[in-house]
Every structure is written in structure tokens, then in C-alpha cells.
Image (cartoon, rainbow, N blue to C red):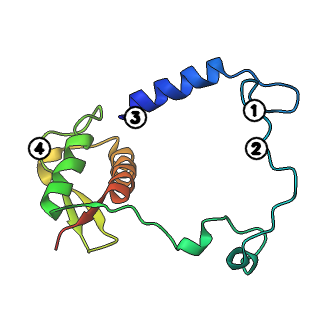
């Protein structure tokens, strides 16, 4: 099943489900309902009470796609180009470092006076932070 199919199925089941006062689905037989308290698993009892149940699995890290530094710089520059007042010539972005990586925005002499230079630098930082969550620099 694909995600849209799962979503459709979940919505259909939610619409069809009618709960009785005990919180059970009305069409479900109650013969298999456990009424005794369930003892905790021994391996879970060693975890602190406020830790999530999946804490014993360790941290799960999303795998980031790797991009060349030049590709990341081009992506940042393309996004900056959409900002009103961004010069079309004399602006460059350099991506440096490995993981975590950073970017440097520089303005050449061809840009002329820039009243929104600080705004462009802040926007460059925002774009960089967004891309850092998605990409690592390919070495």
C-alpha cells in the first residue's frame, strides 16, 4: 500500500468506528479483552520511568543526501536570486567545511551599493541552515 492508500483506509476506519461507553469498538467481541494488569517486561524495568519506550534502540539518524560543495553553493545562490533587490552580478557563495558545513556570502565590486546587504546575509544563513538539515558535503 502507498501512503495515500493508508491514509484513506485510516480515515474510512475512523469514520466507521463507533465506540461504546467502555471505549471498545462496538462490533468487537469482548471475550478476548484482558482485564488483569500486565507486568512490565524485565528489560524495560531498567529504563528510567520518563524515558521513551524506544530509548533502548538508540538514536535513529536520518541519512542525508551528499552534495558537492559547488552544488550546495549553487542552490543557495539560486534561492538568494529570488529575493527582491538581490544583484545578478558580483555576488558569490562559498561552501566550506565538512560536516557540519558552512557558507560564506561575498559581494564583488560589480554589485554597486546594496541597501539590503544585511538582509541578504541573514537570508543566506537561513537557507544554509535549512540545507544543512537535508545535505552533507560530499568529500
Q: Which mark is residue 3?
A: 3
Secondary structure found at label 2: loop
* Tag in front: 1 or 3: 1
* Tag in front: 3 or 2: 2
* Tag in front: 3 or 4: 3
**Nearer to the camera, 16 or 87:** 16
Secondary structure found at label 1: loop
**Residue 107 appearing in the image:** no
Residue receiving disc 1: 29
First of labels 3, 4 by sequence position: 3
Q: Which mark is residue 32?
A: 2
Residue receiving disc 4: 89
**Nearer to the camera, 120 or 33:** 33
First of labels 1, 3 by sequence position: 3
From the top left corner, tell me how far across and down residue 137 is, in percent: 23, 67
Q: Say if mark 1 contacts mark 2, CB within 8 Å.
A: yes
Q: Quadrant of the C terminus?
A: bottom left
Instruction: Calculate the distance from the C-alpha at mark 2 to the C-alpha at mark 4.
Output: 73 Å
**Nearer to the camera, 138 or 108:** 138
Circle 2 packing at 10 Å, graded few (<14), some (14-19), many (20+), is few
Question: Left or right of 101: which side holds 108?
Answer: left
Amino acid at each position: 500500500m502507498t501512503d495515500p492508500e493508508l491514509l484513506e483506509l485510516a480515515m474510512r476506519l475512523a469514520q466507521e468506528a463507533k465506540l461504546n461507553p467502555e471505549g471498545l469498538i462496538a462490533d468487537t467481541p469482548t471475550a478476548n479483552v484482558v482485564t488483569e494488569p500486565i507486568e512490565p517486561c524485565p528489560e524495560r524495568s531498567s529504563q528510567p520511568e520518563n524515558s521513551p519506550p524506544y530509548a533502548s534502540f538508540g538514536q535513529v539518524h536520518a541519512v542525508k543526501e551528499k552534495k558537492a560543495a559547488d552544488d550546495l553553493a549553487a542552490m543557495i545562490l539560486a534561492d538568494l536570486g529570488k529575493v527582491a533587490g538581490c544583484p545578478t552580478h558580483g555576488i558569490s557563495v562559498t561552501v566550506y567545511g565538512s560536516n557540519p558545513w558552512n557558507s560564506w556570502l561575498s559581494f564583488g565590486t560589480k554589485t554597486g551599493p546594496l541597501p539590503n546587504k544585511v538582509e541578504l546575509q541573514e537570508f543566506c544563513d537561513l537557507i544554509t541552515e535549512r540545507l544543512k538539515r537535508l545535505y552533507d558535503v560530499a568529500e
